[in-house]
Structure formats: C-alpha cells, structure tokens
Amino acid sequence: MAEPAFLAPRFIALEGPIRVGKSTLARILAERLHARCILDSAENPFLGEFYEEKPGAAFRAQMYFLLERHRRLSEISLGESDGPVLSDFIFQKDKIFANVNLDDKELELYERYYNMLAASLPAPDLVIYLQAKPDILRARIDKKGHREEAKISGEYLAAIARAYEHFFFHYSASNLLVVETSEIVFVERNEDLQELLRRLRQPVKGTQYYLPLGTV
C-alpha cells in the first residue's frame, strides 16, 4: 500500500526564550509558506515595573500577557477554506514565565484564569522550539539595544532558558521540531533558511531534532 501523501501542518508555532529569534523567523516563514502570521504582544504597560522589580508588577505583567495572548490566538480559524497560520508563540509560553515570575499565592490565582482560557484555544500541528545558550541570548539582547530588556539579569535569562528546556523535554501536545540556533541566525544565512524550509516539507512525528548547517 502506498504511503499517504504528506499533509503540511495548518498551524505552526515557534517558541523559545527571550531573543532567540522567534519573531524574525516567524515573519520570514509566514511569507515563504503563504501563511497568516500572528505575533506575540510586543508591548506591556507593566513590563518596565517588572524589570525594576516593583512589588506586584510581576503578577500585573503576567495577567496582561495572559489575556493578550489568549485574544490573539482566539482569532485563529482553521476551517477548510482558511489558509495556514504561523505564530511566534504558544499559549503555554505564558505559564512557563508565570512559574518563574510569580510567588505561590499569585500562581494559584493565575492558574485559575489560565485553565479557563486555555481550554478554548486550538493546539498547533507543529511547534518549532528554537534553542540557544544563555550567553548567546545575552549577546542578542545587547545587540538589540532594547532599553527595558537591558535590565534583564544573567540569572533571570538562565532561569528562563532552563524553564524552556524543562517544559519541552516533557512536551507532547503537538509534533515538535527542536532547532539549535546558538551558532546561526536564519535571517543572516540563507543556506540555513533554505535547509529549514526543506525540512518543513517533510513530516515531523513526535519530537525530532534538527541541526542547521551552520552548527556543523
């Protein structure tokens, strides 16, 4: 019996820690794959106070992100007449950060809202998890020159990277492609981008690992 034809994923989501390159790659892939692009919230009125470690700011910032991310993902339609969708975040991202940023009482209240909102959202067909070492993330933050991100400590950056590794080590909600990006930036090396596009034309089942040419 012939193998069934490969069906390209309808909903692809990129994930990874701060400044790993999600948004840039999401825009490029959305253009190449003719997909609608949904980007994470870039602005949060409570983020500055959070980086300054003001009391209660972490909870306010987290709740803002939770509601805004839910709103954006709620707009996804995956009907037969709709085209593919590509996002630069998954809803579970919010909980990764909440577990790092909130104290026990705040987290208990947060999870009540998270669980109510998560139930209504579609799961991606494929998640692309972009990995990078904390020192690489630090260098990319410094290069970006964002005033508020400059306040991020090395300890916090390492904690977020560890939280992502732990989360995706246990992840099974969607097919998962793990991509190590410490040695490459897709927007700067076309060969790596073309290799990734070729990989996305092949099926990903369960969790698979992909090393771009630039890492060899």
Image (cartoon, grey):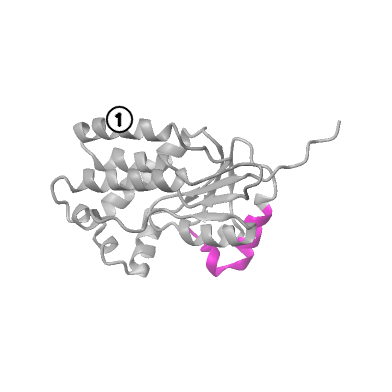
Compared to residue 133, the image places residue 119 above or below, namely above
User: Which residue is the extreme one toward the front?
Assistant: 81
**Is residue 190 rendered to the left or right of residue 87?**
right
Residue 105 lies in the magenta stretch:
no
**Is residue 78 rendered to the left or right of residue 181?**
right
Q: Percent position (x, y) of residue 47?
A: 25, 55
Q: Quadrant of the C terminus?
A: bottom right
In the image, which residues are magenta? Answer: 182-198
For label 1, the SS is: helix
Please name the predominant secondary structure of the magenta segment in the image. helix
Residue 196 lies in the magenta stretch:
yes
> Which residue lies at the image location 58% right of the left edge and 40% below the top edge?
125
How many tags in the picture?
A: 1
Q: Amino acid at mark 1?
A: Arg
Q: Quadrant of the N terminus?
A: top right
Residue at image mark 1: 112
Regarding residue 123, the answer to whether it shows in the image is yes
Compared to residue 196, the image places residue 123 above or below, namely above
